[in-house]
Amino acid sequence: MSTNSRIRTFFYGHYYSKYPVDYNRIVQNWIRDVDDKAYPILIDVLGFEPEINQYIVEFRDFDIAGFYAGIRNVDGISGGYIGLHRNLLDNLREYPKNLEGGLVYETIHGFLQPLKFRPDWRNVTILNTDESFDIIFEVEFDERIGLDDFINQLYNRHYHRSSATSGYIYFSLLWDIREKFGWDPIQRFFKLLKNSDIPLVIEGDVNEFYNIINSLIDADIQPFFKKHGFLL
């Protein structure tokens, strides 16, 4: 660990963090909790080891609460860059709610980024349309650690805003699929993207997405797509 008069750094597990020195105890406890308790669950939700497995977390007075900015090099360390507003450290809730608080969600962005765009593919995948897949990933994680209030917040915030012609295009569809068939078909879809040698389900190709999900579930899910305004 290195310090100066204002900024301290802390390297633990999968996270290298930079933060104002006054938050030393809070940040270190949070990073340890997320790495020790949340990170293995995130891997279980994804279904395989993530391609991006090291993260740089910087706490500053950013313009927004949190963001993920892809791979960066900071202090000679390369990893997925997570920016979090310092104010989050003033309002961090008790365990296990402190596992969430933005750090888990931004890590989810890092887990899914390689599936959204592959350097060897000309087109980005359907995951990159918006954050629908990231949010449903967060829902599954929250259920596994018993954060029902977080799940309710995500549902209330996004479900009724989600459709083929509005924001978070796939979230309500993914929510209904997960409610009916569980997490397995969504996880298997992630694995297909990871293991495919050719582009699967490029951005906007809802028909291909339907065909793959339908085959994974081995059931007619056309009514789910129609319910949310998708024309097949």
Image: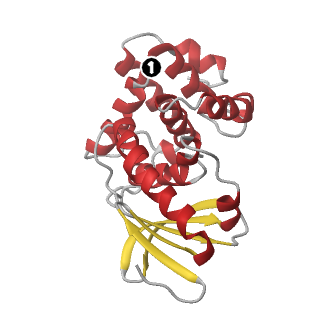
Using the rendered view, name the quadrant where residue 51 is placed: bottom left
Residue shown at the point (32%, 37%) measured from the top left: 47
Q: Quadrant of the N terminus?
A: bottom left
> Which residue is identified by label 1?
182
Residue 137 shows in this picture: yes
Q: Is residue 116 visible?
A: no
Q: Residues within 10 Å of mark 1 (few under 14, many from 20)?
A: some
Image: 2 above or below 95: below
Extreme-bottom residue of the structure: 5
- Camera-side residue of 218 and 80: 80
Q: Is residue 167 above or below residue 50?
A: above
Q: Is residue 216 left or right of residue 128?
A: left
Across the whole image, how many numbered discs are drawn on residues?
A: 1
Q: Quadrant of residue 150?
A: top right
Horizontal side, residue 203 vs residue 229: left or right? left
Tell which of 76 and 17 is nearer to you. Answer: 17
Q: Position of residue 87 (x, y in %)?
A: 71, 63
Q: What residue is drawn where x is 40% and y is 44%?
A: 37
Is 114 left or right of 88, judged from the image as shown? Answer: left
Residue at 66% in and 23% down: 228
Q: Quadrant of residue 21?
A: bottom right
**Quarter of the rendering occupied by the C terminus:** top right
Residue 112, x across and y down, in percent: 43, 49
Colour scheme of this structure image?
secondary structure
Q: Nearer the viewer, residue 155 or 204?
A: 155
Using the image as rendered, state which of residue 128 and residue 59 is in the foreground. 59
Residue 144, x across and y down, in percent: 46, 30
Q: Secondary structure at mark 1?
A: loop
Residue 69, placed above or below residue 216:
below
Q: What kind of residue is marked 1?
A: Gly
- When the figure is inspected, residue 229 is found, relative to residue 83, above or below; the finding is above
Residue 16: x and y, percent?
42, 69
